[in-house]
Amino acid sequence: MNDPYMKDTDFMKGDDPFFPTAESGDGPFAVSREGKVTTTLLQQKRPISALTAYDYPFAKIIDEAGIDIILVGDSVGVVVAGEENTLPVTMDQMIYHTRMVSRAVKRALVVGDMPFLSYQPSVEETIRNAGRFLKEGGAEAVKLEGGAAIADRILALTKYDIPVMAHIGLTPQSIHRMGGYKVQGRSARQAQGLLNDAKEVESAGAFAVILEGIPIGLAQEITETVSIPTIGIGAGPYCDGQILVLHDLLGLSSSFHPKFVRCYADLTAITAEAVRHFQSDICAGKFPTPEEGYE
Ligand code: KIV
């Protein structure tokens, strides 16, 4: 019998006795765990790739493409539900989307994003809501916005084995304090505060930290200071990993074009063209043909 307390790298070989690979049998657990991304594995892996997803079909595509982390972001409120900002997003909505994503994912680490007011009121509420992401949503970790101010939440969650990804810098739930989506940490005082935030979330037990909307040099300094991986968005190239919002990358966010977003496709144009084609086929009597119907 192999030692069940194997190193993460041993899981990469697919020889975990509790999770046989597809090749090693077809029992109920005959799903390949080869290469499964875990919070511990991420401590060594560089660079780390991450994307948001909110539903089954996109999560499946992203997972099969080999992205390491899938964040079910509260950005769902903006890019899918059409809200002005992320503040209206509820716990029930997040659980609904997290469940869809985790059903599709075999390899990536699924992280559920804790929405506004699901962790701010108290440590107890934080634990209860974070637990829902794991119990009901099938997530493997949660993300919270904030640094030193929420270190007690991070400490409590990690104490009860709920892994936490922290998120500092431009934190969208703080839009009204920041006066809009503005780059953070430009002044020496703010930069020092963010460096301190990064150290505090690391000490509290976060397994990674998202750095959003901060200057390149500050992101580099934080990355060199903390030992947990930094995942950047609008924070330049010197982070341990990068994340983008899926709908921005696919060209589906019509009014949001900051310079840190690279558009890898124009799905708005592709979708509009497909729909116009469908419409013109109907008008021209070309759809459906008899071959597309039943006798
Ligand atoms: O909600 C989200 O998509 C996020 C990313 C921008 C990191 O928090």
Image (spheres, rainbow, N blue to C red):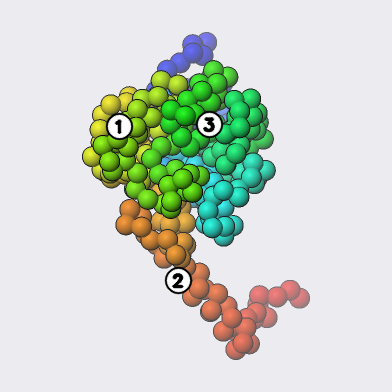
Please give left or right for residue 122 compared with residue 262 in the image.
right
Residue at the farthest bottom position: 284
Residue 49 image point, x, y percent:
38, 41
Residue designated by label 2: 269
Residue at (53, 53) in percent of width and height: 85
- Seen in the picture, residue 180 relative to 118 is either above or below; the reply is below
Question: Is residue 67 found left or right of 88 in the rendered image?
Answer: left
Q: Quadrant of the C terminus?
A: bottom right
Can residue 29 be seen by looking at this rendering? no
Depth check: give the residue in front, 129 or 15.
Answer: 129
The amino acid on which the numbered mark 1 sits, given as a three-letter code, is: Gln
**Residue at numbered disc 3:** 141
Count of numbered circles on the image: 3
| Residue 254 in the figure: left or right of residue 192 | right
Residue at 70% x, 75% y is 293
Count neighbours of disc 2 (C-alpha within 10 A) and say few if under 14, some if 14 to 19, many if 20 or more. few
Q: Amino acid at mark 3?
A: Ala
Respond yes or no on whether mark 1 lies under 8 Å from ligand 1: no
Mark 1 vs mark 3, foreground winner is 1
